[in-house]
């Protein structure tokens, strides 16, 4: 029980790490006189640092003790949080965000692996659904708290909150994450990922998972500028809109787990796919009609927030089990690819942003449509439900 609580707390830290300070983007942008592109670098460099470190964290965790990797990573994250909270210039803030990206990579990647180490695949679907739900809860609460913290304590208060949360996770990790004998023959170079790259099945799972995940990450990255600057949404209202989407994903994860138990994995999976398809159609209508109402935009995004939960929670445990003794690397690889695609998407959208929803909507429609197509390919190949 304490192990599950620890892993869930780490997952919540990973969820809050991004969303809690996003509402304060305009304040950071004003204080350091940043362009929209420079503001997005605060997210993008964090993504890149996460991607790089997650690859090494995955290999190290397959070779050595996962507990040590998590503890060292949390210490790095804590140092990065201190730098962010004390930053007096843009460069120091970026350095702190890079260290936060390096630090959160190990705990974020290995939380899923610890669950995979300790529980069967069937149990993993439920626990990963629970983990995603609580991460989404953290993401839903983070912008609400972040908005209020920014109002009363300024944007630095958000990084102080992350610092305190990380210290709690560090203590729990030191107390409750078990030491586990690993595979000393695993190399720490990028060659350790060659078996993964050679697996067509894992590549297909990874592409499908990441394409389901990235639309939301790109949306929340650019949404502060869209909502607050161009749609005239106040700071308090923005926290509500942002939090609503993550809350819906949390509810979708929780209800999805119950739905899987009640009607079966396959039927629940296709319900999720159908909702994602409806989301694509809704976004196309929104762009054609040039809708600029924040409530309607949020409602369209809410369809995807609820729909993607079931496919993601179904696919993830299967992806980790494809190759033997590679769970750490598989989890790291999936997370790394997700962050690369998110960073590229965020860069493309911010570079082409024209004060309308259209560039954002086009990115989401393309990635979500590809995810739906690939998920149907997996079903046709019986890669998910062959034993159902």
Image: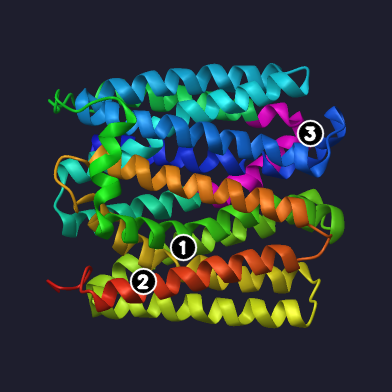
Q: Which residues are magenta?
A: 138-158
Q: Residue at x 72, y 64 (%)?
A: 359
C-alpha gap between disc 2 and disc 1: 9 Å
Q: Is residue 4 visible?
A: no
- The quadrant in which the C terminus is found is bottom left
Between discs 2 and 3, the one toward the N terminus: 3
Q: Say which element carries label 3.
A: helix
Which numbered disc, 1 or 3, marks the residue closer to the eye? 1
Taking 251 as reference, is 356 left or right?
A: right
Percent position of residue 152, x then y: 76, 33
The residues tagged by marks 1 and 3 sit, at their Cα atoms, a distance apart of 30 Å
Q: Which residue is mark 3?
A: 28
Q: Which mark is residue 304?
A: none
Percent position (x, y) of residue 355?
Answer: 84, 60
Q: Nearer the viewer, residue 294 or 33?
A: 33
Residue at label 1? 212
In primary-sequence order, the first of circles 1 and 3 is 3
Please give the name of the residue rendered at 55% of the width and 73% of the height, measured from the top-left corner.
303
In this rendering, which labeled residue sits more in front, label 2 or label 3? 2
Give the residue at mark 2: 375
């Amino acid at each position: 029980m304490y192990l599950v609580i620890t892993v869930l707390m780490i997952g919540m830290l990973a969820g809050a790490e991004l969303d809690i300070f996003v509402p304060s983007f305009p304040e950071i942008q004003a204080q350091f006189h940043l362009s929209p592109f420079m503001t997005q670098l605060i997210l993008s460099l964090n993504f890149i640092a996460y991607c790089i470190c997650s690859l090494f964290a995955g290999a190290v965790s397959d070779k050595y003790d996962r507990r040590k990797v998590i503890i060292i990573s949390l210490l790095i994250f804590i140092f990065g949080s201190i730098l962010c909270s004390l930053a007096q210039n843009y460069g120091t803030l970026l350095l702190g965000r890079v260290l936060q990206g390096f630090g959160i990579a190990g705990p974020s990647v290995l939380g899923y692996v610890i669950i995979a180490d300790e529980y069967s695949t069937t149990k993993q679907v439920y626990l990963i659904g629970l983990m995603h739900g609580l991460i989404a809860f953290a993401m839903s609460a983070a912008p609400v708290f972040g908005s209020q913290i920014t109002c009363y304590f300024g944007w630095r208060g958000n990084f102080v909150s992350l610092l305190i949360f990380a210290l709690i996770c560090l203590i729990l990790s030191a107390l409750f994450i078990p030491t586990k004998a690993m595979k000393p023959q695993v190399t720490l170079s990028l060659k350790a990922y060659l078996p993964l790259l050679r697996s067509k099945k894992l590549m297909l799972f990874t592409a499908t998972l990441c394409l389901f995940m990235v639309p939301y990450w790109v949306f929340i990255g650019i949404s502060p500028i869209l909502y607050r600057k161009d749609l005239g949404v106040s700071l308090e209202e923005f926290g509500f809109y942002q939090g609503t989407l993550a809350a819906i994903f949390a509810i979708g994860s929780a209800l999805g787990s119950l739905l899987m138990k009640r009607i079966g994995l396959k039927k629940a999976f296709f319900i999720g796919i159908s909702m994602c398809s409806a989301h694509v159609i809704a976004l196309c209508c929104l762009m054609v009609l040039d809708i600029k109402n924040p409530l309607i935009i949020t409602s369209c995004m809410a369809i995807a927030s609820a729909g993607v939960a079931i496919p993601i929670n179904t696919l993830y445990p299967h992806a980790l089990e494809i190759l033997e003794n590679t769970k750490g690397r598989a989890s790291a690889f999936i997370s790394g690819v997700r962050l690369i695609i998110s960073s590229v998407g965020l860069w493309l959208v911010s570079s082409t942003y024209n004060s309308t929803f259209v560039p954002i909507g086009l990115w989401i429609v393309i990635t979500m449509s590809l995810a739906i197509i690939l998920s149907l390919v997996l079903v046709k190949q019986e890669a998910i439900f062959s034993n159902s």
